Amino acid sequence: VDLGQGTRPWRSGGGAALGRHAGARVTFWNLRADGTLPEPPKNFGPWSMNFVGANFGRPPVLDAAGRWREEMIVDELRPSDLHASQLRRRLTRE
């Protein structure tokens, strides 16, 4: 996902009463921006969100029981599109 300048990646639509923007164990994969990304605000989602291939400009956090933040070199991240890869695998197994 190309976030352009990456200045507001966590801004979402919808009312404040709708709850958090992400669920437990959600994985954000291959987020690209012109610079470093800001961390999502504390109320964006649960502590168990995963970030792979996103540049936060901070050391990685690899906590299997909590937040996972793994920076990768974008050109080396495989698969580059996690959703398409999982869908392809699911459809070829049926």
Image (spheres, helix red, strand yellow):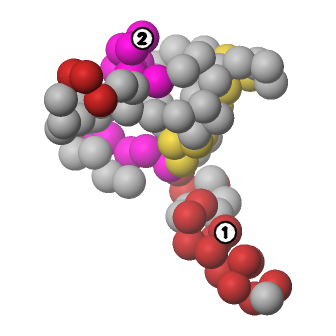
Q: Identify the amino acid type marked 2.
A: Lys
Query: Marks 2 and 1, how far apart in space?
Result: 29 Å
Image quadrant occupied by the C terminus: bottom right
Q: In the image, residue 8 lies at what x, y percent?
A: 21, 30
- Residue at position x 81%, y 85% in the image: 93
Residue count near mark 1 (Cα–Cα under 10 Å), binned few <14, some 14–19, many ≥20: few
Judged from this view, the residue extending furthest toward the top is 42
Q: Which picture quadrant has residue 3?
A: top left
In the depicted structure, whether residue 94 falls above or below residue 63? below
Residue 6 shown left or right of residue 74 in the figure: left
Residue 86 marker: 1
Residue 15 marker: none
Q: Which picture quadrant has residue 42?
A: top left
Disc nearer the start of the sequence (2/1): 2
Q: Is residue 76 magenta?
A: no
Image quadrant occupied by the N terminus: bottom left
Magenta-highlighted residues: 30-45
Residue 18 visible in the shown view: yes
